[in-house]
Amino acid sequence: MSELYRTEPTARRERVLLVGVILPDSDVDAHDPLGELRSLVRTAGAKVTDEMIARRGRIHPGLYVGSGKAGQIAEAAGAAEADVVVFDADLSPAQIRDLEKIIARRVLDRSEVILDIFAAHARTREAKLQVELAQLEYTYPRLRHMWAHLERIAGGATSAAAAVGGIGTRGPGEKQIEIDRRLVRKRVAELKRRIVEIDKRKQRIVQSRQGNFLICLVGYTNAGKSTMMNLLTGAGVGVADQLFATLDTRTRRWNLGDGQVALLSDTVGFISRLPHHLIASFRATFEEAIGADLLLHVADASAPRVVQQIQAVESVLGELGCERKDQLLLLNKTDRIIDPTIRTVLADKYPHAVFTSAVTGENAGAVVEAVLLKIQGRQVSVTIEADCANGRLMQYLAHHTRTTDKTYHGSSVRMEATISEKHLAALNNFGKDVKILTDIGK
Ligand SMILES: Nc1nc2c(ncn2[C@@H]2O[C@H](COP(=O)(O)OP(=O)(O)OP(=O)(O)O)[C@@H](O)[C@H]2O)c(=O)[nH]1
Ligand SMILES: [Mg+2]
């Protein structure tokens, strides 16, 4: 069944009508409610030909929007010569089926578009298996309804070809109609088994790195994580002005100077309302974040919805059980902030964040310093008296202190040194071979 997996983008650019549904408690961008869905659909390779907004007091259980609105959507789709109608919502398979009957075109929801992009961007075997599982679990029940009345839709759509390919059909595709439910269940079980193996292997890899300080870049998709990885480590990983450009994690050595080395990993971007199946099946990809000592949260400070994006990332981190991890917020893309008051507002809201630009390198030094501080703790100046005969102690001091003055008295040495609080505390392990005489940094 693996040959069913297709990642080739379709040759023809499909025409899409976007539909946003605003409910009283909707948290959408008032200026551009469909902005994110538009980017998603474009990233999936389709062309947005028209957009509509429906305001409702509550969701219509059968059709999501009311039947009058569904009729208007059908008319607008016809006028825009749209092949597909994409809703900025998560629709049930039954809602999709009933909407398709009225609209006479393929209807997709937001999660299916995200899954479609993941399918097109998955490169490694591991990422492909994960996407396939998520699609079989999420898209398959929806596709089944679609095939049942496909012929009628194909007749009604502007292009019959459009109804059987393109956006939302990558991955387990049109041949799916021939697959019986039992086989799908078998395949899902098989994929889950293989993904558990991948997950275990990944956990072993992450564990084998213990002893190193593990840092993981996390953040909203397109925030600049991969660009930041390149700036900090010279890794040369792929960067694109696209949503979900990165689907595979990379880990690189990061030399922070001062004798300090860490491992830095890049990860899949997050998005608000990330399909639950994706989080579950991409767990192995998030293993880096789960096992990290420090999360570097990269946010696009030039995005109008940066605050909501930061919240969305925090909520996904919560789902992964990472909410209590040590974090450092990097407010990236400062070179694109036009209105200086935005910077002031953000600085007020996130007083511990570092403003930076992965493209111009602004404040890269401050990022390194902030990370060093996280790794080593605060630096203090002290006078230390140590027994020179203790070789291990001498080595420890050479490694973890910067010394400005040293005087020898018999078999002991007295040094004026700068040391991190963490390393200073660890000096207790050397017992009476070492004495802290002054602690002037506190
Ligand atoms: N102007 C500006 N553009 C940036 C900056 N950082 C990243 N970009 C651009 O933003 C786009 C996305 O960057 P990526 O590094 O691919 O973002 P990402 O967070 O890895 O995105 P995904 O892997 O898709 O989740 C690219 O076009 C980058 O060149 C920045 O500081 N300033
Ligand atoms: Mg990336």
Image (cartoon, rainbow, N blue to C red):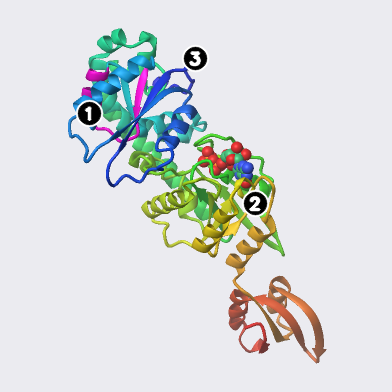
Amino acid type assigned to the residue bearing label 1 in the image: Gln
Q: Residue at x 25, y 10 (%)?
A: 152
Residue 233: image location, x then y, percent: 67, 49
Amino acid type assigned to the residue bearing label 2 in the image: Arg
Q: Is residue 262 left or right of residue 193?
A: right
- The residue pinned by badge 3 equals 11
Magenta-highlighted residues: 83-103
Image quarter in which the C terminus is found: bottom right
| Marks 2 and 1 in Cβ contact (< 8 Å) | no
Which of the two marks, 2 or 1, is nearer to us in this view?
1
Residue 175: image location, x then y, percent: 34, 16
| Marks 3 and 2 in Cβ contact (< 8 Å) | no
- As measured in the structure, the alpha-carbon distance from the residue carrying label 3 to the one carrying label 2 is 40 Å
Ranked by sequence position, the earlier of labels 1 and 3 is 3
Q: On the image, which quarter does residue 4 sit in?
A: top left
Identify the element where label 3 is drawn: loop
Q: Judge whether residue 242 is colored magenta.
A: no
Identify the element where label 1 is drawn: helix
